[in-house]
Amino acid sequence: CSAASLITPQNILNGTVGGEITFNLSIDPVNQTAHTGTWKYGPKIVVTWTNSNPVYTSDYKGRVEVTLATGTLKFNKLFATDSGEYTVAITTAPSGLNIGGRVELKVYDPVSLPTIQSNVPNPVEFSDTVTLTCTASGSDVSYRWFNGSSEVSDTPRIHLSADNRTLMISGILRSDHGPFYCYVFNHVSNNISKPFCLDVKSSSLGTVTLTTENLAGAIIGTFLGGVLVSVIAFLIANSIRRGQLCGKVPDIKADINENPPSTYENVHNMKTMDKGPSPPSPSTDHHYMGLQPGKQSIYHSLQGKMPA
């Protein structure tokens, strides 16, 4: 008594709205072919064929095609409504054996370019609590935060929401200026925000504010002398550096390996993003106690992973 089996994809297939995807099938043994067959989406017929005469229903005509010898089905343009379970029933030739299988498809909208907003335009050091909110469209979006090249995690002063969409910093410090990045991803795409910097103002309590007038008076009075000149030069250089980092993503490219959370462990071979920070290398310090600004030299274009 002869037998045959149909080999189908075992995992859920992930596709992008407007993209292509193929349900690859093969028949064992290879001397058997799909003489007749039917693909269904739930109870709805997608295509039927007998030998060399495929008939597509109106919802799929022009955007799907079947390989008659094996029953392999290809979508040339996916809709969000195509998500779900597909079944196939085949009668082989020359043996006339009945075989079948199922394929699960999930279609995602790609993630958009995320944006970051702050609840406090000009936070004051030690006094304000700043909440940064990341906004992006797409299907099943996940979020990660970076300060420079360091990924942000919960600490006594820093809190992430359950979905990682918001980042709250209590008792803001001047060193918390950023630049911050919001990295978003799903099974089929990823994206990263433009750099976002906080202009943290000095607190009036216990802090000496150097205005233009008292700086000029100090210089004229020669009380600070060369030390003051050095301090001013440092502040100007630091201000320029911060302005450069927050004005644009530095055009420096480097290969990195992005590792999304285990919930999305089947995300792999993702496409290179144009710009963004590199996720940090493993560190011996597992408690990121303060949001330390990254150095300009460590900014890289973010490469994520996308399913093959």
Image (spheres, rainbow, N blue to C red):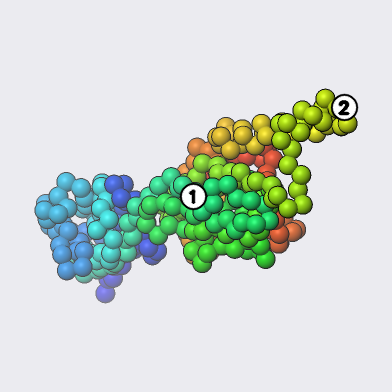
Residue appearing at x 77%, y 52% in the figure: 206
Secondary structure type for disc 1:
strand
- Estimate the x, y position of residue 31 in percent, counting from the top left: 28, 58
Marks 2/1 in contact by CB < 8 Å: the verdict is no
Q: In which quarter of the image is residue 83?
A: bottom left
Where's the N terminus, which quadrant? bottom left
| Residue type pointed to by label 2 | Thr
Q: Is residue 272 visible?
A: no
| Residue type pointed to by label 1 | Gln
Left or right: residue 143 versus residue 199 is left
Is residue 44 or residue 72 the one in the foreground?
44
Residue appearing at x 63%, y 60% in the figure: 170
Secondary structure type for disc 2:
loop
Separation of marks 2 and 1 at Cα, in angstroms = 44 Å
What label does residue 222 carry, if any? 2
Residue appearing at x 25%, y 47% in the figure: 77
Q: Name the residue under label 1.
A: 117
Residue appearing at x 49%, y 48% in the figure: 116
Is residue 290 or residue 224 the one in the foreground?
224
Is residue 63 or residue 181 the one in the foreground?
181
For disc 1, the neighbor class at 10 Å (few under 14, some 14 to 19, many from 20) is: few
- Estimate the x, y position of residue 243 in percent, counting from the top left: 62, 34
Instruction: First in sequence, mark 2 or 1: give its number.
Output: 1
What label does residue 210 carry, if any? none
Counting every numbered tag in the picture gives 2
Q: In this view, does 295 lie above or below 3?
A: above
For disc 2, the neighbor class at 10 Å (few under 14, some 14 to 19, many from 20) is: few
